[in-house]
């Protein structure tokens, strides 16, 4: 089952590449069907979730390189399942966004798209660290091609920047993985890359800090955390719409996933020392990202910087490390994926029609395209955290959980909600309200395909905002088990349950 | 009937959904039927529930209805659940009823507008959110309604989006109130973590137990909640968004920015009065802020020439009275004034709207005049509204509520004489500014000759609100055995009794006569100086400076622009290119420079290579020998 989750997009990508010879639209169709199948498989696994005995819902192991303790070890818990579902869901949306936009070499485009997704799914499933690293690379390389070949005017620069940042941080991670295995072999005598085994034994403290930092920086670049966020604005802006959706919606989540899955449970002691700094950087990201989002004139760049702000909440939640904050962080991952994906889809629709992302040439689109206006308003409002939608829930739970641990930084982070209103409403004003810009005269409204995709995403945010319990129930046991691992090794972290106030 | 409580917010929400999702399918008439009809049904349900509640009051003082559990995280289980007590009931009834009248009025007022369907969609959403706000049994759901009304306020202020100025006003309103909302949110975090629940009643109960000794935390929590209330209710120092909010259509100003949403802060403080009682300093601050606001806004209203801006400042000022009442513990009086204010201020706005519509969107009172001839009905309704606002004795609803507030301020511990004096000064200024408008706009020497007809839908709304502005004070007349009025007696099943001090040698009647004389003096002064008056008084220096200062609302806008907005915009402008990226550009530049420098050594000249090898060998040997 788990292997199928990876193989479906991997093989599907190959089929899509071949399908180009059947006709120009075929690669897209194949990709669409492949991702629907992926989504259905994920839903089936969710259906079986309640009967699972422990946090792991499914697990598969094949020996791979036994000499180095490397195995092809996949496992799925609630956290990974939610993210796999998000991946498949946003994959479908990315295909919908690419439908008309991609005309050159569609077969190769969808091959890259599906392989990136396969890599992401692998990242969420692999619990052998070496295997994890392989999937990490599989996820990044096709994305480089997507940006470099189908991107916008500065695609070369953006793709290279993306590649250098992620490869440099990937190298740090590889070093850390190897070091972790070596140190573990020294202390326990077993040479292994297997996560459950590594989890079971404590690290010597000095080494733990350095190894942890390697992992942390790799994931922090991906998240992104200030000050490692600068690749994001260029990559998101220059990428084609479908790739922007996947970048913002899913690839960033791999960073957060790594923090939750590996960094804190493996090195709780070292993390406890890092927590004040990481919390501070999370808050800085929330505020700085919001400020820069407001300052942009390029629509996609604006959305990109808003991601920096939203991911700051995730960082805040992860380092608060209590059940509420982590539930909030996961909810924020889902909500941000959907709402930002939708905003990129809208930006792509506008760019496809007008060939510009410059908000100086936009304004008053509501008059030309009221459906686009209404949906744009909806997702902007979701982005500023309106209660009743999933984004608010994520941010609120993060704040609630982190207020317990660090009330002052949390209160500062909450002012990000004001700045979010500033930039989100500025977006609405610059694009949809205001006097209708003559440049956009006769702008066609969203077509059925775009309306369908955006409508599904809007409904998802509302449903998650008002009925979040199924998702919380799914991720709850996974989060709890990781908190327990961390707590066994580093009691101080478990103390985050303490009441701040006397 | 109580089990149908959910329908009160759900019906307008359904109206919103239908109007939004099926847009394009509706004619204007169809949209009006849905928009007005959904609120009418909600009002009917609310009325029936209210009837049953009053007939058979629950023993606990409240009905609770839980729809579903919103979430369950680590012991927190907020629900989509309602709590209906006397306070919530009064709020719900006033909100739905006034909303119904204003929807009816708007069906005609907005006729022919391009965004007619959109307008009713937003209005319905507003009613749903506002009802949720007052019915919520937990702070999280309250916050949902709280933000929901803010969103609708934003959307409706910027309803005519073609004009960028309207968009600015709308965003100003949203962002300024959100500053308060964020304080409220942090307050909710603090309270929820401290007491382990979001539900308001258990939370207040635990607060009374654990925080009985006062201290830092109750003060902090009350201050944060107060921050939310100040933003939403446009009180000092977060009040400057309200005058600009008049950019929205007049029915919006009447419903959201006069009758209902701006009183959400009053509701919040009344709802969480248990917490404020634990923090007496904050409660005093509420009273002081209310007193200062009501006076400052009153003088602001005096200098305006735009009829809607006069009414906007007037709203700030009247909500100030409510805060003053809350601050001295006159909880029921504040809610009483909320109710009468909802009626007479809606009446004033809607009458002004009828004038504005008749004069083709003319707002300047100096370009009106002699309206009493052309629009006698509207003149009458505006006159009644003004009388109620000024609290003309005996015949107006505003008299009863304002007198109650002033009396309770007088008898409270903190009230005498300064807070009471501010209230009295405010009463004088109120009658002065509103009758200035009456005498200039309705009886002035204007050139008005072309007028549009008002229409029955607007007329009937004005008629009903006129009657209410005269008669709503009567609910306080029947006095029970303990000497309480009917209305306040009913409210006191949910709120504590007001201050019960003695009058310091004055009886309630004596003070009423005094304030009535002050109010009448204001009217008289307005008549004496009439339309020329203000010009005559304030045309010359140095008083012209004062007039300009008041016209700009005491310069708060300029202060905030210089202190906050301009620095923010400048920061955004200089950091557009992202400072941090410069860091990485620096790294790239260094590596490129190194690359450049090193690649120059690959010159192909044998001499250089030989020199390099020799130098390297010497250095190496030197290390090997000496190190």
Image (cartoon, rainbow, N blue to C red):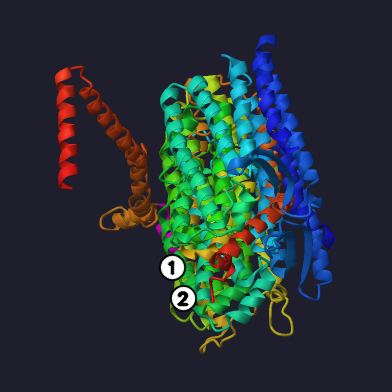
| Magenta-colored stretch includes residue B433 | no
Q: Residue at x 35, y 51 (%)?
A: B558
Above or below residue B26? Residue A75 is below
Above or below residue B187? Residue B595 is above
Tell me the chief SS of the magenta region: helix
Q: Is mark 2 on a helix, strand or loop?
A: helix
Residue that carries the numbered disc 2 in the rendered image:
B419
* Chain letter of the residue beneath label 1 in the structure image: B
| Magenta-colored stretch includes residue B529 | yes
User: In front: A374, or B51?
Assistant: A374
* Chain letter of the residue beneath label 2 in the structure image: B
The numbered mark at residue A86 is: none
Tell me: B484 left or right of A232: right
Q: Position of residue B109 (x, y in %)?
A: 63, 40
Q: Bounds of the magenta span? A: B522-531
Q: Position of residue B597 (x, y in %)?
A: 22, 28
Residue count near mark 1 (Cα–Cα under 10 Å), binned few <14, some 14–19, many ≥20: many
Residue B32: image quadrant is top right
Residue count near mark 2 (Cα–Cα under 10 Å), binned few <14, some 14–19, many ≥20: many
Quarter of the image that includes the N terminus of chain A: top right
Tags 1 and 2 in contact by the CB under 8 Å rule? no
Residue that carries the numbered disc 1 in the rendered image:
B292
1 and 2 marks on the same chain: yes
């Amino acid at each position: 089952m788990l292997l199928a989750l990876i193989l479906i997009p991997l093989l599907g990508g190959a089929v899509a590449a071949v399908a180009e010879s059947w006709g120009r639209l075929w690669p897209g169709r194949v990709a669409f069907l492949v991702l629907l199948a992926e989504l259905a498989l994920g839903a089936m696994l969710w259906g079986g979730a309640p009967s699972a005995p422990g946090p792991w819902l499914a697990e598969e192991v094949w020996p791979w390189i036994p000499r180095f303790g490397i195995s092809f070890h996949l496992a799925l818990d609630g956290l990974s399942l939610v993210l796999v579902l998000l991946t498949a869901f946003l994959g479908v949306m990315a295909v919908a966004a690419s439908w008309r936009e991609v005309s050159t070499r569609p077969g190769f485009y969808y091959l890259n798209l599906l392989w990136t997704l396969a890599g992401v799914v692998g990242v969420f499933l692999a619990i052998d660290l070496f295997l994890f690293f392989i999937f990490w690379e599989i996820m990044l390389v096709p994305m480089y091609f997507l940006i470099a070949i189908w991107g916008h005017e500065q695609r070369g620069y953006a793709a290279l920047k993306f590649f250098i940042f992620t490869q440099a941080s990937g190298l740090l991670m590889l070093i850390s993985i190897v070091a972790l295995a070596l140190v573990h072999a020294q202390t326990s005598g077993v040479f292994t890359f297997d996560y459950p085994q590594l989890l079971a034994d404590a690290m010597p403290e000095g080494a733990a800090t350095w190894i942890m930092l390697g992992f942390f920086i790799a994931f922090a670049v991906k998240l992104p955390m200030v000050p490692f966020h600068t690749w994001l604005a260029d990559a998101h802006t220059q990428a084609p719409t479908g790739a922007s959706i996947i970048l913002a919606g899913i690839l960033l989540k791999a960073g957060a996933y790594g923090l939750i899955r590996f960094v804190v449970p493996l090195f709780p002691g070292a993390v406890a020392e890092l927590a004040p700094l990481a919390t501070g950087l999370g808050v800085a990201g929330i505020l700085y990202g919001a400020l820069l989002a407001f300052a942009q004139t390029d629509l996609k760049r604006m959305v990109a910087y808003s991601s920096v702000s939203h991911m700051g909440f995730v960082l805040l939640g992860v380092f608060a490390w209590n059940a509420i904050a982590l539930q909030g962080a996961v909810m924020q991952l889902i909500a941000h994926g959907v709402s930002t994906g939708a905003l990129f889809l809208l930006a792509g629709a506008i760019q496809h029609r007008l060939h510009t992302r410059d908000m100086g040439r936009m304004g008053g689109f509501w008059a030309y395209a009221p459906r686009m206006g209404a949906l744009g308003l909806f997702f902007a409002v979701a982005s500023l955290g309106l209660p009743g939608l999933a984004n608010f829930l994520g941010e609120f739970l993060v704040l609630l959980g982190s207020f317990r641990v660090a009330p002052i930084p949390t209160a500062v982070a909450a002012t990000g909600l004001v700045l979010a209103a500033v930039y989100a409403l500025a977006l609405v004003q610059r694009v949809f309200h205001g006097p209708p810009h003559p440049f956009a005269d006769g702008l066609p409204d969203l077509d059925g395909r775009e309306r369908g995709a955006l409508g599904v995403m809007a409904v998802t945010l509302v449903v998650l905002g008002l009925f979040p319990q199924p998702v919380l129930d799914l991720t709850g046991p996974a989060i709890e088990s990781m908190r327990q691992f961390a707590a066994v090794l580093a009691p101080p972290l478990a103390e985050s349950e303490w009441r701040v106030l006397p | 009937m109580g089990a149908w409580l959910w329908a009160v917010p759900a019906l307008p929400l359904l109206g919103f959904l239908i109007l939004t999702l099926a847009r394009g399918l509706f004619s204007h008439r169809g949209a009006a039927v849905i928009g007005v009809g959904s609120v009418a049904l909600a009002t009917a349900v609310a009325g029936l529930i209210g009837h049953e509640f009053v007939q058979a009051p629950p023993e606990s003082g409240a009905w609770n209805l839980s729809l579903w559990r919103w979430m369950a995280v680590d012991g927190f289980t907020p629900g989509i659940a309602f709590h209906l007590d006397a306070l919530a009931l009064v709020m719900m009834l006033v909100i739905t009823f006034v909303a119904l009248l204003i929807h009816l009025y708007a069906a005609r007022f907005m006729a022919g507008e391009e965004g007619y369907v959109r307008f009713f969609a937003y209005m319905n959403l507003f009613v749903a959110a506002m009802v949720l706000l007052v019915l919520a049994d937990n702070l999280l759901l309250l916050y949902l309604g709280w933000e929901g009304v803010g969103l609708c306020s934003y959307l409706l202020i910027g309803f005519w989006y073609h004009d960028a100025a309207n968009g600015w006003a709308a965003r100003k309103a949203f962002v300024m109130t959100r500053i308060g909302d964020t304080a409220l949110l942090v307050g909710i975090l603090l309270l929820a973590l401290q007491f382990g629940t979001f539900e308001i009643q258990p939370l207040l109960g635990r607060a009374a137990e654990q925080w009985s000794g006062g201290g830092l935390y109750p003060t902090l929590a009350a201050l944060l909640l107060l921050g939310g209330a100040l933003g939403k209710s446009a009180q000092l120092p977060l009040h400057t968004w309200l005058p600009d909010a008049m950019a929205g259509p007049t029915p919006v100003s009447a419903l959201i920015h006069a009758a209902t949403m701006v009183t959400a802060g009053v509701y919040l403080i009344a709802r969480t009065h248990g917490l404020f009682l634990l923090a007496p300093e904050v409660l005093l601050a509420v009273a002081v802020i209310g007193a200062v606001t009501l006076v400052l806004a009153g003088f602001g209203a005096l200098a305006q020439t735009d009829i809607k801006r006069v009414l906007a400042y007037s709203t700030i000022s009247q909500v100030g009275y409510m805060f003053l009442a809350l601050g001295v513990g006159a909880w029921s009086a504040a809610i009483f004034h909320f109710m009468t204010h909802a009626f007479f201020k809606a009446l004033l706005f809607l009458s002004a709207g009828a004038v504005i519509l008749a004069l083709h969107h003319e707002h300047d009172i100096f370009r009106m005049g002699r309206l009493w001839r052309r629009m006698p009905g509207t003149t009458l309704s505006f006159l009644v509204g003004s009388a109620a606002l000024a609290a003309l004795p005996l015949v107006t609803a505003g008299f009863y509520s304002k007198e109650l507030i002033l009396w309770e301020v007088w008898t409270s511990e903190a009230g005498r004489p300064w807070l009471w004096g501010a209230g009295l000064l405010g009463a004088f200024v109120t009658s002065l500014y509103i009758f200035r408008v009456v005498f200039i706009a309705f009886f002035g020497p204007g050139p008005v000759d072309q007028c549009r007809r008002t229409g029955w839908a607007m007329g009937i709304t004005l008629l009903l609100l006129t009657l209410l502005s005269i008669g709503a004070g009567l609910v306080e007349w029947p006095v029970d055995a303990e000497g309480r009025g009917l209305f306040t007696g009913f409210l006191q099943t949910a709120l504590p009794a007001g201050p019960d001090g003695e009058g310091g040698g004055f009886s309630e009647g004596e003070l009423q006569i005094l304030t009535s004389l002050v109010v009448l003096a204001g009217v008289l002064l307005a008549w004496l100086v009439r339309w020329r008056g203000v010009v005559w008084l304030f045309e010359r220096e140095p008083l012209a400076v004062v007039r300009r200062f008041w016209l700009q609302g005491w310069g708060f806008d300029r202060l905030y622009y210089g202190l906050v907005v301009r620095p923010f915009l400048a920061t955004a402008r200089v950091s557009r290119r992202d400072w941090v990226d410069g860091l990485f550009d620096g790294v790239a530049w260094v590596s490129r420079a190194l690359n450049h420098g090193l690649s120059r050594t690959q010159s192909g000249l044998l001499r250089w290579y030989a020199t390099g090898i020799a130098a390297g060998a010497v250095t190496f040997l030197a290390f090997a020998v000496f190190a």
